[in-house]
């Protein structure tokens, strides 16, 4: 096993995990109703924004938001922490409503 | 009913104690070092830092703000923290509250007082896209703080962006229907945790090297790097003037480096020649404590700026939030 590559792969997932945690933290501050249309709007617009932002500089693994390691030469990449933030916000909002 | 003074007493005491300990240790260390020529600022230190800073993170600005002059930035953060609390305590009557003053004291000039948010009806587009816009803006703030060490952004920017999302929700939905329900005690705790976190991040460097806020996760001045990575650089130039304190166990120092810097290791593929080899050169770097300081700073700024917005709009007292 290439420990250096594994460490880098693990490190590139750190913004994603941190994004989810921060998203939940701020998501529980959101109240009110969240219907499926609004949730779908947030998810679709969030994915579009993550695509526009792109992955962080020098990130090259799938957890980092880059598809280059899966499909060589692919230019599609997503901002992983932005997606994590959106998912975390939705989780936090749903959790706060139930709470 | 418990007053604000009693409610936050423990939090204040803990923060004051932590701050006093850090300041006392830093002062004692500085006083003991008076007269030691090795700690005086030398000419060319900026050149040397610029030469080595690429071994931390691609965002040079973050390195300068949080690593090279981290103590200065810590005090600047404290200014934001104290400024926000001083502002809301002295001026934070709230626009809604001002309505009562206008009626009681006979204010006639509308220009003096802005319209109450609760009187404003949002348009259909604002009503249905206000919440997604606020949530996506919050997510953008999260994105900015998690990548502040390697791309544009950081804690200050993130805090302002998240506060902007809160302000947007306040303006669109008004007081009663606002879905972004930042509560005052949450914002006070958020700012306090951020400020205390920044101050406490000074301790690892202070304990291990004798320098407050020293970036023990990255260690740009040489010595052991990330454990298990098998990468150790010997920097050219003057012989390692900021090596770990001789009294510190050399098994403890790499362990702390690994814990702090390990989760943020990046693999840089540079197209230009570096001191580590000709192009293309591979470089494994870690920003060390910079992302943690970004996070603490983001909490501090989010709490402080949002508290100003909240209190200036709604007032300080608990019954005005309801």
Image (cartoon, coloured by chain):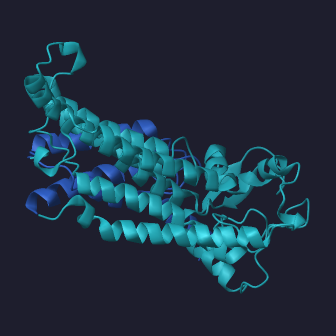
Chain colours: A blue, B cyan
Q: Position of residue B288 (x, y in %)?
A: 61, 63
Q: Quadrant of residue B275?
A: bottom right
Q: Residue at x 67, y 52 (%)?
A: B69
Q: Residue at x 38, y 45 (%)?
A: B86
Q: Quadrant of residue B106?
A: top left
User: Can residue A84 be spotted in the picture?
Assistant: yes
User: Can residue A2 be spotted in the picture?
Assistant: no
Which of these two is toward me, B42 or A48?
A: B42
Q: Position of residue B50 (x, y in %)?
A: 78, 48
Q: Quadrant of residue B113?
A: top left
Q: Is residue B112 left or right of residue B282?
A: left
The answer to whether residue B287 is above or below residue B182 is: below
Q: Position of residue B179 (x, y in %)?
A: 15, 43
Q: Is residue B281 left or right of residue B141?
A: right
Q: Residue at x 44, y 38 (%)?
A: A53
Quarter of the figure with the N terminus of chain B: bottom left
Q: Position of residue B49 (x, y in %)?
A: 78, 52
């Amino acid at each position: 096993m290439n420990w250096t590559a594994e460490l880098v792969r693990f490190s590139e997932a750190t913004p994603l995990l941190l994004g989810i945690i921060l998203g939940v933290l701020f998501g529980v501050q959101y109240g009110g109703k969240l219907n499926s249309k609004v949730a779908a709007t947030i998810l679709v617009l969030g994915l579009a924004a993550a695509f526009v932002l792109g992955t962080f500089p020098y990130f090259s693994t799938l957890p980092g938001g880059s598809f280059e390691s899966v499909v060589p030469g692919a230019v599609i990449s997503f901002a992983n922490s932005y997606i994590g933030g959106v998912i975390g916000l939705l989780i936090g909002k749903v959790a706060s409503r139930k709470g | 009913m418990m007053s604000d003074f009693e409610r936050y007493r423990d939090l204040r005491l803990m923060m004051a104690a932590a701050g006093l300990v850090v300041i006392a240790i830093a002062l004692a260390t500085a006083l003991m070092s008076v007269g030691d020529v090795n700690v005086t600022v030398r000419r060319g230190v900026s050149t040397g830092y610029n030469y080595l800073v690429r071994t931390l993170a691609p965002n040079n600005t973050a390195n300068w703000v949080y690593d090279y002059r981290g103590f200065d930035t810590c005090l600047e953060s404290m200014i934001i923290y104290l400024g926000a609390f001083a502002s809301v305590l002295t001026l934070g009557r709230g626009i809604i509250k001002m309505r009562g003053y206008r009626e009681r004291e006979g204010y006639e000039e509308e220009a003096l007082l802005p319209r109450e948010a609760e009187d404003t009806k949002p348009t259909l587009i604002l009503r249905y896209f206000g919440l997604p816009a606020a949530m996506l803006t919050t997510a953008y703030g999260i994105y900015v703080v998690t990548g502040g060490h390697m791309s544009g952004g950081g804690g200050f920017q993130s805090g302002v962006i998240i506060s902007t999302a809160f302000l947007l929700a306040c303006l669109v939905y008004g007081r009663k229907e606002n879905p972004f329900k930042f509560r005052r005690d949450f914002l006070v705790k958020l700012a306090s945790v951020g400020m205390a976190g920044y101050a406490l991040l000074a301790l690892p460097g202070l304990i291990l090297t004798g320098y407050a806020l020293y970036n023990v996760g990255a260690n740009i001045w040489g010595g052991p790097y990330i454990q298990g990575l098998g990468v150790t650089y010997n920097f050219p130039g003057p012989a390692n003037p900021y090596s770990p304190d001789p009294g510190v166990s050399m098994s403890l120092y790499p362990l702390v480096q690994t814990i702090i810097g390990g989760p943020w290791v990046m693999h840089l593929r540079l197209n230009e020649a570096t001191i580590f080899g000709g192009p293309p050169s591979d470089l494994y770097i870690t920003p060390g404590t910079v992302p943690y300081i970004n996070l603490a700073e983001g909490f501090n700024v989010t709490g402080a700026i949002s508290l100003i917005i909240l209190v200036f709009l709604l007032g300080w007292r608990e019954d005005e939030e309801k």
